[in-house]
């Protein structure tokens, strides 16, 4: 009985995050990149996307290599621009926020700095070993059926880096930003 009460108490603390509709479906994305450039017929495309990256922290500073925390459909969902590598023709662009669908959200997400400060230590156990999760702009080169690894030059101090979650490696306490939109608000 006590466990049920605790479960429902925790359930009330959860917030439902409704993501915006994908500006490009997975099928449309696949058809677009498989077709290549309509102007010069090149198959080499540049895909610009906002995706999730995990970053180990020590004392609030990046410590060690970051890793990508997204699946293929997240790359598609976060895609805001596809262009030909050869002739630079834009094949697809999206300007609405990829998370909340606000007009002009992509430009704001790329221009604004992080508003969720990365803590130096866990508030629960004072451990300095944390893992941050953030949205970052990334570039993927796609040629025919093969995509290269995503690349980003964005660090926590740069515009375009938007932390959404920090987890303590020791006690697993979590800080999370849900509202307002972590990308464009």
Image (cartoon, rainbow, N blue to C red):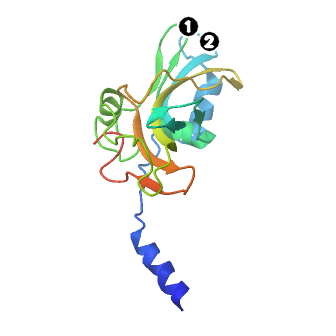
Comparing marks 1 and 2, which lies closer to the viewer? Answer: 1
Asked if the residues shown at circle 1 and circle 2 are in contact, with their CB atoms under 8 angstroms apart, the answer is yes
Front residue of 24 and 59: 59
Q: Residues within 10 Å of mark 1 (few under 14, many from 20)?
A: some
In this image, 12 relative to 36: left or right? left
Residue at (43% x, 78% y) in the render:
9
Q: Is residue 25 visible?
A: yes
Q: Which residue is mark 1?
A: 86
**Quadrant assignment for the N terminus:** bottom right
Mark 2 element type: loop
Number of labels in the image equals: 2
Q: Which residue is mark 2?
A: 42
Front residue of 135 and 131: 131
Up/down of 41 relative to 66, above or below:
above
Distance in Å between CA atoms under marks 1 and 2: 7 Å
In this image, 69 relative to 156: left or right? right
Mark 1 element type: loop
- Give residue 110's position: percent from left, percent from top: 36, 28
Q: Splitting the image into 4 quarters, where does residue 117 fall?
A: top left
């Amino acid at each position: 009985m006590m466990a049920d009460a605790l479960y429902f108490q925790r359930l009330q603390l959860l917030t439902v995050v409704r993501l915006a509709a994908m500006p490009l479906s997975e099928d449309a994305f696949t058809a677009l990149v498989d077709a290549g450039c309509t102007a010069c017929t090149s198959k080499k495309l540049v895909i610009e996307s906002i995706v999730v990256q995990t970053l180990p922290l020590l004392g609030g500073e990046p410590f060690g290599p970051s890793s990508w925390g997204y699946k293929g459909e997240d790359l598609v969902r976060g895609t805001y621009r596809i262009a030909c590598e050869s002739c630079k023709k834009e094949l697809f662009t999206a300007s609405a926020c990829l998370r909340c669908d606000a007009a002009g959200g992509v430009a704001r997400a790329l221009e604004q700095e992080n508003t969720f400060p990365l803590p130096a230590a866990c508030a629960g156990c004072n451990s300095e070993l944390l893992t941050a999760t953030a949205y970052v702009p990334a570039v993927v080169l796609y040629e025919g059926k093969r995509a290269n690894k995503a690349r980003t030059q964005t660090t926590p101090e740069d515009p375009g880096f938007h932390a959404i979650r920090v987890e303590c490696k020791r006690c697993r306490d979590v800080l999370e930003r849900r509202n307002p939109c972590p990308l464009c608000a």
